Image (cartoon, rainbow, N blue to C red):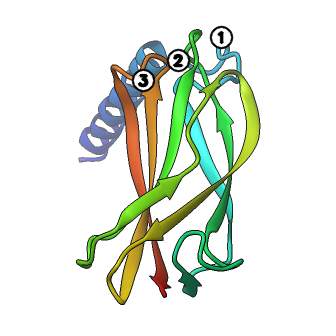
Amino acid sequence: MKTAISESFLSTLKALVVLISASWLFLGCGGDDDGKPKTTEVEVVSMTPTSPASLKYYESATNDRVSVTFNYVVVEPEGVRIFVQPVSTAGGSGTIHYTPSSVFKDTGSKTVTVSVKSDQTSVLVDRIKILIKSADQTVTISEKFIEVSYTFSD
């Protein structure tokens, strides 16, 4: 009985060693990794004012927009365009306003603004969309949403 447990344990240990070796072979052990990201990344670092907040409609007062600051790392050699847009999924409609995107390359930080204008009493912006497109805007590279609560009104 003692021998069977030892053989079973040895067999399990061998299988584990093979599995770890195969993982290193297929996934890499980090020796040839240059430490650089493999995909373009955008990280929102701040939004002013912080959510939740009430703001006025675009160009109707001094508190009429949200400033969004993000850091980016771009791996596409031709660069990308990064759009930060307000989204209202809670109903209500209006014209969205956002900073147009130039072509971003390498790494950096950028602050853009978003706002809404409408003839409705108010519009709730409940998401900020981060849209990354190819430099020529023919390919969507990624799209993500950040939940917020900005109420725009007269």
What residue does disc 2 label?
A: 28
- Crowdedness of circle 1 by 10 Å Cα count: few (<14), some, many (20+)? few
* Image position of 44 with respect to 74: above or below: below
Q: Secondary structure at mark 3?
A: helix
Q: What residue is shown at x 57% (from left), y 35% (from top)? A: 101
In the image shown, does 19 or 135 lie closer to the viewer?
135
Q: Of the residues shown, which amino acid type is indicated by label 2? A: Gly
In the image shown, does 120 or 145 lie closer to the viewer?
120
Q: Earlier in the sequence, mark 3 or mark 2?
A: 3
Disc 1 to disc 3, C-alpha distance: 15 Å
Q: Which mark is residue 23?
A: 3
In the image shown, does 73 or 3 lie closer to the viewer?
73
Indicate the position of residue 77 as horizontal and vertical percent values. Answer: 59, 9
In the image shown, does 22 or 48 lie closer to the viewer?
48
What residue does disc 1 label?
A: 32
Indicate the position of residue 112 as horizontal and vertical percent values. Answer: 66, 51
The reply, left or right, for residue 53 in relation to residue 71 is left
Disc 3 to disc 2, C-alpha distance: 7 Å
* Image position of 149 with respect to 3: above or below: below
